[in-house]
Image (cartoon, rainbow, N blue to C red):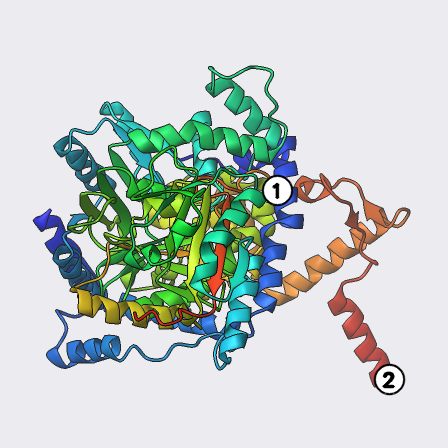
Amino acid sequence: MQPTSHAFAENARAGLADAHLQQALDLMTRQGFPARRRAVVAKLPEFEALRDLGREIKDHTLAHLDFYLELYERNVLAAGGEVHWARTPEEARAAVLKICRASAARTVAKGKSMIAEEIGLNDFLERHGLTPVETDLGEYIIQLRREPPSHLIAPAMHLVKQQVAQTFRNAHRGLPPNRGLEEPRQLCDEARAMLRPRFLAADIGITGANFLVADTGSSIIVTNEGNGDLTQTLPRVHIVLASLEKLVPTFEDAAILLRLLARSATGQEFSSYTTVSTGPRRAGDLDGPEAYHVILLDNGRSDFLSGELRDMLRCIRCGACMNHCPVYAAVGGHAYGWVYPGPIGAVLTPSLIGIEEAAALPNASTLCGRCESVCPVKIPLPKMLRYWREREFAKRLEPVRWRLGLSLWAWVAQRPRLYHRLTEIVSRVLGWAGRARGRFRSLPFAAGWTGVRDMPAPEGHSFHHLWAQRRRLAGR
Amino acid sequence: MDEARARILAGIRRSLGRDGLAPADEAALRSRMASRSTNLVPARAVQLDRAARLALFAKMAEEADATVSRLAVPQAVPGAVAGYLSDQNLPARLVMAPDPELDRIPWQEWPLLQIRRGRAEADDLISLTPCFAAIAETGTLMLRSGPHTPTTLNFLPDTHIVLVYADQIVATYEEGWVRLRQAANAAGGLPRTVNFVTGPSRTGDIEQRIVLGAHGPRRLHILLVENRQSDER
């Protein structure tokens, strides 16, 4: 998709003005993921220790990624599967198309995959005459609306049920127009009924992977709906789309991360379905795909194995950082303008599509640190946002007014006497001007502040002035 | 693709600042994998006696919206299945895993139960399967694919009934995996797929409201049988 990350400010304003989005965000932050996560984490005393272990497992794997990838590949081959390596989104899309063509496929059922979003797979398949059908309920809704996901694990979380109902009425033409679609139950049943024949007819099933296990050559997916399992059980061919950093050494390592994933993501003890798949149908099996392919996408990740951005490769895509982010909760996921929203998106997006396009994202944070405090693998997100801010400044990507303002402030701040003199003057002037009300409703150059709240008036003297005065009095 | 593979691996090694691993390092990694060091596992699930482990499994499964019936012996299974279906107002017609173990249950004593053996098809409403193991930690069933246990039975029908013997209940995922590895070594490899199933299918994709039965089963019913009696396994 064409990114609009450069337009974060405009996107955010649109999000703030969207009443439906605000209602949906309110439902999530008040009753949804954060509260459920808190409740379930409180029931597992080992949770903090598991976070440390999760970080260690991911760091260990990344430090030996070449070894584990080669081992993983050997084990996939030994189980009768195939591995396709892709440096770029183009190579990954070409690999998918080649498999589709080789099996004379027409329709493709898709489980939820962020890598498919990252490489823009649906548009590509449609351009080449294939029909991709998203089967995760949220993904299905946004596919009908031709929208990108607004959340890592709840792609349609920006919508309220009335919007989903309208989407279904527009898309599902054959059904009685007066049918009831008021409740999530009815919407879910209708989607189930519409999608079931699509599963059964699909030639290819494409899923993502939450983990790839080197030791056994297995892919693991975690879902609640069961769509990922129907996707990889019914069609003749199963394609797994995954990026390099999904590797873990053993099932035991995956088990640690699985204990963290569901709790951090949806606040469940365990998701409904955690499925470990190793190769295609065996001799004697009555179902399952005849072919099993894995497409391993790099897309720049190998470059980040060294240096400041390495920690982001630990991410297990649970979405906890965005669920707890005050900025995400205010503006929603689409404001971030590409595939990955929220704090992790503000770190990943500049890495994957360039800081030039995504310069606004690292600034879309108060650096309050909640994201880091809930991250199941302890990614230091605020530190990484600061890293991108430095890169942005070094590349002179911020607006001219910011740069001028910051330069002016730096110049003054490096001259303490001048600084004290100026702040004393400003305090006095503002204190005098605001003496009647004690606050300002508007101030020149500060509309960003006074547009939404009053600015308190200073008492009349700067802190330094008062301090010096007190010292003089004490010394007398 | 081979070029992509070589370039990616070379890029990784460049970033890591080394060539391929030294033999000693590789040996260390292999021994890390082989040791399968005892994981940090939730204390609530380990060091329980048999009865407490069963109780934890049943409690966690019910918290995940499964229903659980406890039976003393396998002979009670057909009656429990028929009773459950009639309670739920469901037809007494089901598709069952073609599993020799399940065949030993005296189904013929309940002739009103219509049973087909095989994989699930689109119009099957109710399935019945055995399980490979069950995990007390989170009330999770561990189901493996195979000639006797097709995976479609776990996902296509609206109602999934699973038979669990008490001796199949382990504390943690890791213990279940150890059992699987032993079985795989005996059988010549891992099964195509292993499904860890915790409660019925669900979604929260619309307004964060949990709705059961998104694409997979709307109901998951567990028959927990205390004794196998004289059956060998």
Q: Which amino acid, mark 1?
A: Leu
Same chain for the residues under marks 2 and 1 in the image: yes
Picture quadrant of residue B189: bottom left
Residue at 20% from the left image edge and 46% from the top image edge = A292
The kind of secondary structure element at disc 1 is: helix
Relative to the observer, which residue lies in front, A278 or B9? A278
The kind of secondary structure element at disc 2 is: loop
> In the displayed image of the protein, which residue is found farthest to the bottom?
A475
Relative to the observer, which residue lies in front, A136 or A447? A136
The x, y position of residue A74, in whole percent, is 13, 60
Q: Is residue A212 left or right of residue A438?
A: left
Chain of the residue under the numbered disc 2 shown in the image: A
Give the Cα separation between the discs numbered 2 and 1. Answer: 59 Å
The x, y position of residue A316, in whole percent, is 40, 57
User: Which marked residue is nearer to the observer: mark 2 or mark 1?
Assistant: 1
Q: Is residue A398 left or right of residue A64?
A: right
Residue at 53% from the left image edge and 40% from the top image edge = B205
The crowd level at tag 1 (other Cα within 10 Å; few <14, some 14-19, many 20+) is many
Residue at 44% from the left image edge and 60% from the top image edge = B75
Mark 2 / mark 1, whichever is N-terminal: 1
Q: Which amino acid, mark 2?
A: Arg
The residue wearing badge 2 is A476
The residue wearing badge 1 is A25
